């Protein structure tokens, strides 16, 4: 009673107590800049609650080591990483229907929410190339990434088994719907690494998602694996001669989650409810080409406010893209991560 009376007196004398700042862990770069403009600033304007962004590397390890001490309230994660974090008790359980409305749950695609995470956008791991390197015939298929005779030069690849093993099987002609089943077998893994052997001498590795575009622009590589939004940003903002090949794109899902250590859980839920509105998703996709996870948001996506570029055509889940697409299986990735990493490290240790 005394505490509530004191709080009331404080408001009379000094005005409302300012809302605490929310801390959102995210990816940095053009991605974070788009989030700030499309989601963070409008949320602050609507609620009066400020949002502070911190950059992290997207891993569960970072959440284990830094999520509690650094006071993270919301976290942007890959769907498979969120599954692992949820199983370890690092994330709060979320009641998605209570956040967005039960009827709205049918609006989400391609992935539904899980116990601790709700899909917010889709991205694609794609192959891109330096236009200057191929003045004649251009790469058009994921098979061309492994064809160093027809398309000579260095390939920039993430130092990870993620994506490249799927591409290796797609390059061998495995249908997308059979890739994860085959990679679950020793035979499939051996085939993937055998295909990767064919470009071993031409690989340069990257760790930071900003690196592959820079490697192409600086002519350190002629082809690169990376994320469609990063390549788009370089091509439009920096006028870099970088082209995306949509064949073989691996479509993944970004999710919102809430660390279990937060002491601002309700404010974090309020943020998620705001960020998951179709209008919020559409604003984000107008700034950077990551597609909304709600079908109703597509109709609201217009031009990039800076360049005037129509953005729908650049989204990884836009229906007009040609070539094969593989939907990243987050459950499979979560369950096989350790095995794939061991096999990948053993392959790296092999003598050429």
Image (cartoon, helix red, strand yellow):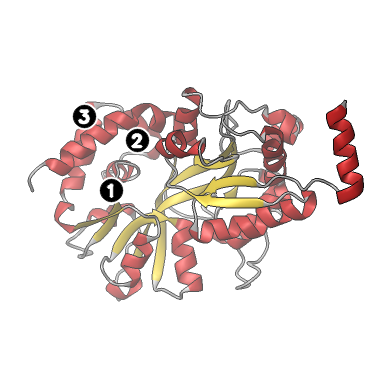
What residue is shown with label 2? 179
Crowding at label 1, few (<14), some or many (≥20) Cα neighbours within 10 Å? some
Is residue 346 something that shows in the picture? Answer: yes
Residue named by callout 1: 159
Closest to the observer: 302 or 76? 76
Q: Is residue 155 left or right of residue 50?
A: left
The correct choice, above or below, for 234 with respect to 167 in the image is: below
Of the numbered discs 2 and 3, the one sitting upstream in the chain is 2
Image-based side of 105 in relation to 332, left or right: right
State the image coordinates of residue 214 (x, y, percent, origin top left).
Answer: 35, 67
Secondary structure at numbered mark 2: helix
Q: Residue at x 30, y 30 (%)?
A: 338
Upstream in sequence: badge 1 or badge 2:
1
Rendered position, 14 above or below 86 = below
Labelled pair 1, 3 in contact (Cβ < 8 Å): no
Q: Which x, y percent locates residue 85?
A: 47, 30
Q: Residue 66, percent across and down?
A: 46, 39
- Image quarter for residue 203? bottom left
């Amino acid at each position: 009673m005394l505490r509530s009376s004191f709080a009331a007196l404080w408001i009379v004398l000094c005005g409302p107590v300012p809302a605490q700042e929310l801390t959102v862990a995210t990816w940095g770069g053009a991605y974070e800049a788009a989030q700030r403009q499309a989601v963070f600033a409008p949320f602050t304007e609507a609620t009066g609650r400020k949002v502070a962004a911190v950059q992290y590397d997207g891993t569960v390890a970072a959440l284990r080591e830094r999520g509690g001490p650094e006071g993270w309230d919301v976290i942007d994660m890959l769907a498979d990483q969120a599954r692992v974090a949820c199983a370890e008790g690092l994330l709060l359980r979320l009641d998605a229907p209570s956040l967005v409305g039960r009827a709205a749950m049918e609006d989400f695609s391609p992935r539904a929410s899980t116990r601790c995470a709700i899909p917010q956008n889709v991205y694609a791991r794609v192959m891109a190339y330096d236009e200057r390197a191929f003045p004649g015939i251009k790469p058009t298929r994921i098979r061309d990434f492994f064809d160093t005779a027809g398309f000579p030069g260095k390939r920039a690849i993430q130092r990870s088994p993620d994506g490249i093993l799927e591409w290796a099987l797609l390059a061998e002609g495995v249908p997308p719907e059979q890739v994860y089943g085959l990679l679950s077998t020793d035979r499939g893994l051996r085939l993937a690494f055998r295909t990767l052997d064919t470009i071993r001498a031409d690989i340069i590795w990257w760790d930071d998602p900003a690196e592959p575009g820079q490697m192409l622009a600086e002519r350190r590589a002629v082809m690169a694996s990376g994320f469609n939004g990063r390549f788009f940003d370089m091509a439009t903002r920096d006028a870099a001669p970088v082209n995306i090949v949509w064949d073989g794109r691996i479509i993944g899902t970004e999710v919102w989650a809430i660390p279990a250590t937060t002491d601002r859980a309700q404010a974090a839920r309020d943020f998620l409810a705001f960020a998951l509105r179709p209008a919020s998703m559409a604003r984000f996709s107008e700034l950077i080409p990551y597609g909304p996870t709600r079908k109703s948001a597509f109709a609201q996506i217009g031009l990039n406010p800076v360049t005037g570029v129509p953005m729908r055509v650049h989204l990884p889940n836009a229906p007009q893209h040609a070539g094969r697409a593989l939907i990243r299986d987050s459950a499979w990735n979560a369950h096989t991560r350790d095995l794939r990493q061991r096999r990948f490290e053993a392959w790296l240790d092999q003598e050429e």
